[in-house]
Amino acid sequence: MKMDRRTVIVGMAALAASNNIVYAQTNYNVEMLNVHPEDKKKRMVFHPMIQVVEVGDTVKFLASAKGHNSVSIKGMIPDGATPWKGKINEEIELIFEKPGVYGYLCQPHATLGMVGLFIVKGEGMTDNVEAAKAVKHKGRARKIWKEIWATVDEEGLLNS
C-alpha cells in the first residue's frame, strides 16, 4: 500500500498525540515534617496526609525535616503491589502501577500518628479497602486512621 506524505504526517501526529495521553503522568510531593505548615498544633506529619493519584503518577517523599522516612504498611497495599521502605532522611520516589489504597507510615513516628494514605484511581481501586481498614495500629495512629477513613468517606474519595 502506497502512502502519500499527508497520510504519513497525519498518522505520525495521531500517534504522537496518543502517546502523550498514554504516557501522561503527574508528579506529586509529600513532605515529611515535624510541624504541619498550616496548623502548628499538629506534629510529626506527612503533608498532604491523603493524596489521590492515577496509575502512572509519581510521588516523591521530601525529607523536609530530619528524622523521617516513608514505609508502606503491611496489609494496606493492593495485592501484587510493590511495598517500599525508605531510609531515614531519604527522599524516595514511587510510581504507582496498580489501583487501590496504599497506607504508609514514618517508622520512628508512627505511634505519634505520622501516617498517610494514597488512593490510586482505576478499576479495582476499592478491592483492598476493607483489608486496609482492618489493619490494627498503635498509639495515636489509631485515632489518625479513623480521621483519615472518615475524610475519605466524607469527601467521596473512593467514588470513581
Image (cartoon, helix red, strand yellow):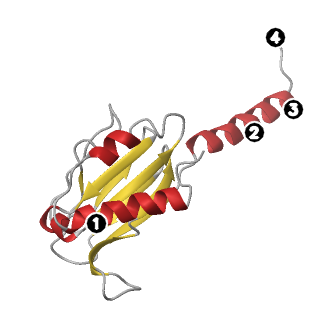
Task: Verify CB contact (< 8 Å) between mark 1 and mark 4.
Answer: no
Regarding mark 2 in the picture, which secondary structure is present there?
helix
Could you tell me if residue 99 is visible in this image?
A: yes
Please tell me whether residue 85 is drawn above or below residue 100 in the rendered image.
below
Residue tagged 4 = 1
Under mark 4, the amino acid is Met
Q: Position of residue 123 (x, y in %)?
A: 54, 34
Q: Nearer the viewer, residue 61 or 144?
A: 144
Query: What's the mark number on residue 143?
Result: 1
User: Quadrant where the C terminus lies?
Assistant: top right
Residue tagged 3 = 6
Q: Residue at the spot x=43%, y=37% of the render?
A: 98
Closer to the camera: disc 4 or disc 2?
A: 2
Q: Residue at the spot x=60%, y=39% of the render?
A: 22
Please tell me whether residue 76 is drawn above or below residue 66 in the rendered image.
above
Under mark 2, the amino acid is Ala
Query: What's the mark number on residue 101?
Result: none
- Disc 1 from disc 3: Cα separation: 63 Å
Residue tagged 2 = 13
Closer to the camera: disc 1 or disc 2?
A: 1
Q: Residue at the spot x=32%, y=40% of the render?
A: 131
- Disc 4 from disc 3: Cα separation: 14 Å
